Amino acid sequence: MDQLALLFMLLLGAVVSVPVGERLKLPAPVLMTLLGIVLALLDFVPNVEIEPELILPLLLPPLLYAAVRRTSWRQFAANVRPILLLAVALVFVTTLCVAAVAQAIVPGLPIAAAVALGALVAPPDPVAATAVAGQLGLPRRLVSILEGEGLFNDVTAIVLYHVAIAAAVSGSFHVGEAAFELVLSAVVAVVMGLALGWGANKLMDLLGDATLQIGLTLLVPYASYVLAEELHGSGVLAVLTTALFLAEYGTDADDVLTRLAGHTFWDIVDTLVTGVAFGLIGLELHNAIRTASGRWGEMLGWAAAIVAVVVLVRLLWLLPATWVAKRLHARQDYDEEIPMTWRETVVMWWSGMRGVASVALALAIPLKTEDGGAFPDRDEIVFIAFGVIMATLVLQGLTLPWLVKRLGVKADTEREKEFEKTLAIRAARAAKRRLREIEDVEELPEELSEQMLRRAFDIGVRISPDMGDEERREAHQQRAKRLKRVRRIQGEMLSAARHEVLAARSEPGADPEVVDRVLRHLDVRSLR
């Protein structure tokens, strides 16, 4: 088996793991990690030959962009306090605690190398957390915090990692320079992200075509990441800034085709890249096995100790942080999404799985220092990092569904239905306002005006049937039955038309481009 065959196997596994995970009630990323572990243990499967410094630039930008598409800037702004407590403060605390314990138990481990280890195992993986939370039906407030933590904690951890690695390689460390680098990295990333987001938004207006616009969205996160890194900024923060800008200002309410096609496209990208990323985590197991040769007992003990620190620090931090957030939340006049019970706090604690970023940072540790010597305790750091990743991702990922079910934590469906009803009412009222504006400038027949008024009401009822009274709901149900019958008949008619046009593609003298253009018209007509 060569590298290309291995890639196709991971892509196939990414597709298959989704329905299998749904049936087994297990997260697809965890299944892909297990697949990677199995492949790594097979003799005929080659070692992955990919430069460690390319893992983050290749995998992280599309995953971050896809995750941001599911949220909004307003949501982050409303939840900035709990997100900062997790994404910034907890990463710092975890890094310091891991560094202290690692230096105490690993003989001769320099403080800079210990901090690098702490930084690379500190951030929970945003992809794993989002994927798991989405499948388990957790309350929206928990999903929002997990998404926010996962998206922003990599920024803090990666900057800390680079500072620690630079100190370990050069042999010197200055607090002032490190703080300046941290601030400069954030400023450069935000400026670059906003500039690229603004430029991409303007370019999308010029492109016009849905295919070209969607293609541009695939290039934008990579461009944002690479340009920010070239200017010594945070590539992760730049991607987040660009994606949030486009989510806020790059959406045209009337561009239905681009929105539908873009949603499908990014679902596919998210599924495939996520599968490959977590498959690589399992495949890289051979690196950890090789480094532990002859020292299994000692190195497993170190890894277990760091796993305990990572898990316990998260719990010990979440308990008081949640209490503080609740106290501050009680003084606010807006809804801030925080864990409301101890059960939700426990679920948040157990959702702290490590993944792609930790693997990439571990493998990217330099082999040599500036004086030509070996990087201090590199093999030990890599083994401990993989121990943390495997323990949190596999153990917590496999047991989290059971824990959620056991604690009875689930989404507040009544609140979601109420919000859906509110949106349905607003949509119907907006349609009625527009109808009145049209009637002010155009003279509509009374029959047509009444028909349009009913359709305005139907816009809301189709979204949320509960918004109408009983009589109107019954009338709507009758109309819905008739409409369903009409659509069924119309669908069969359009199906016959598509078959006829598609058959013409094989006829002598038929122009395939014309056939495809007509078929596209029929396909779009079928969506209406």
Image (cartoon, rainbow, N blue to C red):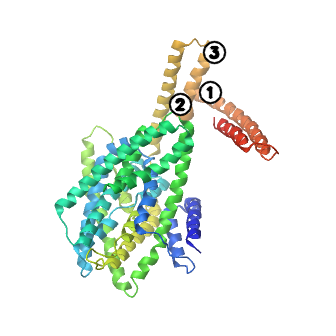
The reply to whether the C-beta atoms of the residues labelled 2 and 3 are less than 8 Å apart is: no
For the C terminus, which image quadrant?
top right
Q: Which image quarter: residue 179?
A: bottom left
Decide: few, some or many residues near mark 2? Use Cα within 10 Å; few <14, some 14-19, many ≥20: many
Q: Position of residue 411 (x, y in %)?
A: 45, 49
What type is the residue that disc 2 sits on?
Gly
Q: Nearer the viewer, residue 173 or 417?
A: 173
Closer to the camera: disc 2 or disc 1? 2
Q: Nearer the viewer, residue 470 or 125?
A: 125
Compared with residue 63, is residue 353 higher up or lower down, i.e. above or below?
A: below
Decide: few, some or many residues near mark 1? Use Cα within 10 Å; few <14, some 14-19, many ≥20: few
User: Does the rendering let one see residue 142?
Assistant: no
Q: Nearer the viewer, residue 480 or 257?
A: 257
- Along the polypeptide, which appears first: circle 1 or circle 3? 3
Residue indicated by mark 3: 447
Residue indicated by mark 2: 460
Q: Position of residue 434 (x, y in %)?
A: 50, 21
Residue indicated by mark 1: 475
